[in-house]
């Protein structure tokens, strides 16, 4: 009985030593192509934008309509909508998957410091209660960013528009 237990113990321990051999495999090269890098460079600001805005803009830039189920060669343009609770982006792609233009709208995001300071300087006793961030991007013209702000001072309410540099429009 001792010999049988000793034999099973030896076989059990030696089987585990063979499981430690690691096979190495060489992987093929991966090439990353940034098709819509121009959009990301143009839309991103110097400051840290709101995280949901950045994430959705990256999804728009990374989306490839040519690899989707609904892609057909006969169409010249694809309009794709991207939604999150904070906002939405309507993007137009050409038949090669290049981003042509976008229309973006986000509510209650982190405002840039230039916009906050411009509102504070021009309207010192007013508070920003709501904001809407609008971006229109075109491959030919670049991006135009506008902030629509609702300011309140007690019972008084005014609406103000500003650009990304803090200029009141």
Image (cartoon, rainbow, N blue to C red):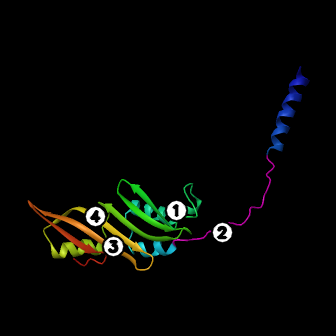
Side (left or right) of 106 relative to 93? left
Disc 2 is placed on an element classified as loop
Residue at (33%, 63%) from the top-left corner? Answer: 105
Q: Is residue 83 left or right of residue 151?
A: right
Residue 31: mark in rendering: 2
| 29 falls in the magenta region | yes
| 10 Å crowding of disc 2: few (<14), some (14-19), many (20+) | few
Residue 156 drawn at (x, y percent) = 9, 63
Image coords of residue 169 (percent x, y): 22, 77
Q: Quadrant of the N terminus?
A: top right
Residue 162 position in % (x across, y down) = 25, 74
Q: Around disc 3, counting alpha carbons within 10 Å, would you say few (fewer than 14), some (14 to 19), or many (20 or more)?
A: some
Res. 154 image quadrant: bottom left
- Name the foreground residue: 51 vs 39: 39
* Extent of the magenta region: 20-36
Q: Residue at label 3?
A: 145
Q: Which residue, given by chain and number where applicable, does mark 1 sit on?
A: 63
**Cα–Cα gap, marks 2 and 1:** 17 Å
């Amino acid at each position: 009985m001792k010999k049988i237990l000793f034999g099973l113990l030896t076989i059990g321990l030696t089987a585990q030593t063979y499981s430690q051999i690691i096979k190495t495999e060489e992987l093929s090269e991966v090439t990353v192509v940034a098709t819509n890098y121009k959009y990301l460079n143009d839309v991103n600001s110097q400051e840290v934008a709101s995280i949901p805005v950045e994430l959705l803009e990256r999804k728009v830039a990374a989306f490839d309509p040519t690899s989707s189920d609904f892609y057909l060669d006969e169409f010249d343009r694809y309009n794709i909508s991207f939604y999150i609770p904070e906002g939405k982006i309507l993007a137009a792609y050409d038949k090669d998957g290049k981003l042509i233009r976008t229309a973006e709208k986000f509510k209650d995001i982190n405002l840039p410091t230039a916009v906050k300071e411009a509102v504070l300087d021009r309207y010192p006793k007013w508070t920003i209660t709501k904001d809407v961030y609008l971006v229109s991007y075109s491959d030919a013209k670049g991006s135009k960013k506008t902030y629509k702000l609702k300011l309140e001072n007690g019972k008084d309410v005014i609406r103000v528009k500003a650009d990304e540099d803090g200029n009141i429009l």
